Image (tube, helix red, strand yellow):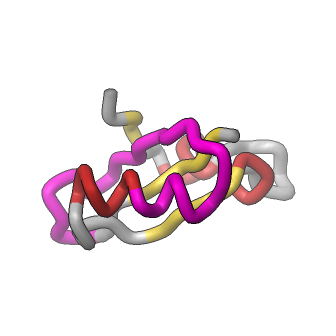
Amino acid sequence: MKFYFTFGCGQTYENCYYVIDAKDYGEARKEMFEQFGDKWAFQYTEETWKLKNGKTQAEEYDLTELK
């Protein structure tokens, strides 16, 4: 499963998101903490990453993917 993480205002990677492929929500969250500590904002599943208007969070809020 893919999980999407965003970064908040004033953080190093503001206006960016990061994707982690993991078996579950907890594993993805653990990996995110290992890579970025607590310097991120929100975690999304593939379902919640897509908005009701058909856009993704990235499209709606002009976010750039970190590779």
Give the residues in magenta.
9-30
Residue that extends furthest to the top in the rendered view of this protein: 67
State the residue in front, 58 or 21.
Answer: 21
Q: Quadrant of residue 54?
A: top right
In magenta segment, residue 28: yes
- Place of residue 40 in the rendered image (x, y in percent of width and height, measured from the top left): 32, 66
Examine the rendered structure and indicate whether residue 45 appears above or below residue 54. Answer: below
Q: Seen in the image, is 17 located left or right of residue 38?
A: right
State the residue in front, 29 or 44.
Answer: 29
- Place of residue 30 in the rendered image (x, y in percent of width and height, measured from the top left): 41, 61
At 66% across and 54% down in the image, what residue appears?
24
The quadrant in which the C terminus is found is top left
Q: Quadrant of residue 66?
A: top left
At 39% across and 52% down in the image, what residue appears?
31
Q: Seen in the image, is 63 located left or right of residue 3?
A: left
- Place of residue 56 in the rendered image (x, y in percent of width and height, measured from the top left): 67, 44
At 54% across and 49% down in the image, what residue appears?
4
In magenta segment, residue 32: no
The quadrant in which the N terminus is found is top right
**So how many labels did they put on this image?**
0
At 54% across and 44% down in the image, what residue appears?
58
Examine the rendered structure and indicate whether residue 23 appears above or below residue 6. Answer: above
State the residue in front, 36 or 26.
Answer: 26
State the residue in front, 21 or 18.
Answer: 21
Q: Seen in the image, is 15 located left or right of residue 55?
A: left
